[in-house]
Amino acid sequence: MHFVDADAVKQHVLWSEQAERLANAFWPGPLTLVLPKCGGSIISRLVTAGLDSLAVRMPAHPTARALLSVFDGPVAAPSANRSGQISPTQAGHVVNSLESRVDAVLDGGACEVGVESTIIGLVDKPVLLRPGGVTAEAISEVLGRPIAERKNADVISAPGQLSSHYAPNAGVRLNATEWREGEARLGFGNVECDLNLSRHEDLVEAAARLFDYLHQLDAGDATTIAVSPIPHHGLGVAINDRLSRAAAPRQG
């Protein structure tokens, strides 16, 4: 659920000292907290998938905040794309994916962060449920302790945990150190390629460009998108998470 301020959040969940510290450090911003739902909450169990916990967030984008203020209540907001496909970071991506399935698209410009929010479970000890726009290192620093990773990868406890997700129509080949004939080439660093996530190896820049560049390359004729190696630290953790799911065998 998306809220305009923390006071509104506290009406629906069992707030904690850890939640307070993370909210003070990263809200509004790309951090989602999963907390036990309190008994007085009127949030439908359809929103929580029948669970006794609730994922809460305060977005930073002025358009999202204006919408929440005008609506004057929390908003359940799933990703604006067809399930399993490349995430949208621009209004055009939403239109191309959903077409006539929606009546309108509110265009607030391109997403600044580029990858989805980090999801931290606070039902028990802090657990990283999905890497995203706030790094695990930054969260650990605020909490003063390491962040555990979820143990049972077969149980879906948060969005973005399917093994195949964020996937283009083309296949994805990871950690490419050379290019093969006919591939679309997504580079990182000082390499010759079709599109470069960051020639200066800036992971913030790479995250902001990731999904848009996947959309662009997938619109071409190539049946495979080859991707340069991405460092596995900072925002690189979230980037590699998205790429590994994009490259996974399709389900169903």
Image (cartoon, rainbow, N blue to C red):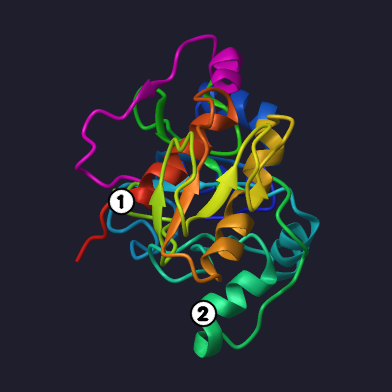
Closer to the chain start, of discs 1 and 2, is: 2
Up-down relation of residue 245 to residue 183 (above or below): above
Q: Residue at x 60, y 32 (%)?
A: 134
Quarter residue 96 falls in: bottom right
Q: Residue at x 52, y 38 (%)?
A: 228
Q: Position of residue 109 (x, y in %)?
A: 78, 63
Up-down relation of residue 94 to residue 163 (above or below): below
Q: Residue at x 55, y 71 (%)?
A: 219
Q: Which residue is mark 1?
A: 162
Using the image as rendered, state which of residue 237 and residue 54 is in the foreground.
237
Q: Position of residue 50 (x, y in %)?
A: 27, 57
Q: Which residue is mark 2?
A: 98
What stretch of residues is rendered in magenta?
A: 137-160
Up-down relation of residue 121 to residue 170 (above or below): above
Using the image as rendered, state which of residue 115 and residue 22 is in the foreground.
115
Q: Determine the CA span between mark 1 and mark 2.
A: 20 Å
